[in-house]
Image (tube, grey):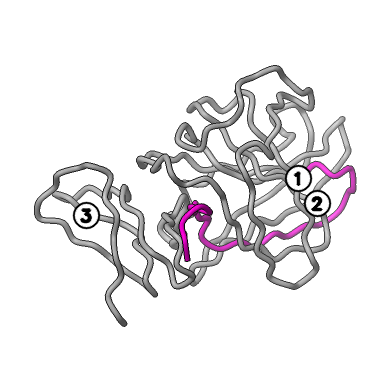
Amino acid sequence: MPPVKLRARSHSYSHLNCWLTKGRLFSITLMGAVLPVFGAISDEGVLMTPLVTLSEQQSTDWKLINDTVMGGVSNSLLDISAGIATFSGHLSFEQNGGFASTRISISQVIPSELNLIRIHVKGDGRTYQLRLRTDDSWDSFSYSHPFKTERERWVSIEFKADDFIPVYRGRTLDAPQLNYADIKQVGFLLADKQAGDFALSFKNIELIDSNRNK
């Protein structure tokens, strides 16, 4: 694999182990701690960094929050295998239910020049929501944007920060525009008013710099 150029964010570290795959920096290990604070130049020539990197050991880090918190009976699970996560389950309207979600906390430093989120998803034709939070609470408002999946086909979708709308329990809020550097949680929600089984697969979630010259 040819070498790739790395861009640091004015941090001074020693004894770094950089793990690269296909020209992408997935993590930096410093004294036993994982610090993904660098960007790498991707094969497409854009500066990028992983927002979420998937591994089997990470499965338990994903929280499942369904309508059961309000008395509903929908269920879901998340499984990670070979770098692909699958969020699946059954959506039910019984007992005033109708949503299922999963999310994970984010702790890394996010470079300010990264201005697009890119997801790679394979779904079931249903419409899901990408949800971002700027705090660590499980019951806070989120920034939401819907996206439609194609049945059994991988698609890549990109989101700008101003694509997202602040919402809380279905209501739109008056809140500051999302800043990607403030992201603390990222996840997916299904609430498309269609009862039945669902499945959404996704790969690593990336932040990229769309302004970089290729």
Along the viewing direction, whichever of 89 and 34 lies nearer the viewer = 34
In the structure shown, which secondary structural element does the residue marked by tag 1 occupy?
A: strand
Mark found first going from the N terminus, 3 or 2: 3
Note whether 147 is above or below 178 in the view shown.
below
- What's under tag 2, amino acid-wise? Thr
Mark 3–mark 2 distance (CA, rounded to whole Å): 37 Å
Q: Position of residue 166 (x, y in %)?
A: 68, 27
Q: Look at mark 2 in the image and give the residue it sits on.
A: 127
Q: Are marks 1 and 3 in contact (CB under 8 Å)?
A: no
Note whether 173 is above or below 191 in the view shown.
above
Q: Is residue 16 magenta?
A: no
Q: Look at mark 1 in the image and give the residue it sits on.
A: 146
Q: Look at mark 3 in the image and give the residue it sits on.
A: 29
The region drawn magenta spans: 190-214
Mark found first going from the N terminus, 1 or 3: 3
Q: Position of residue 15 (x, y in %)?
A: 10, 55
Corner quadrant of residue 78: bottom right
In the structure shown, which secondary structural element does the residue marked by tag 3 occupy?
A: strand
Q: Position of residue 39 (x, y in %)?
A: 35, 55
Q: Are marks 2 and 1 in contact (CB under 8 Å)?
A: yes
In the structure shown, which secondary structural element does the residue marked by tag 2 occupy?
A: strand
Q: Nearer the viewer, mark 2 or mark 1?
A: 1
Q: Residue at position x 31%, y 47% from top?
A: 37
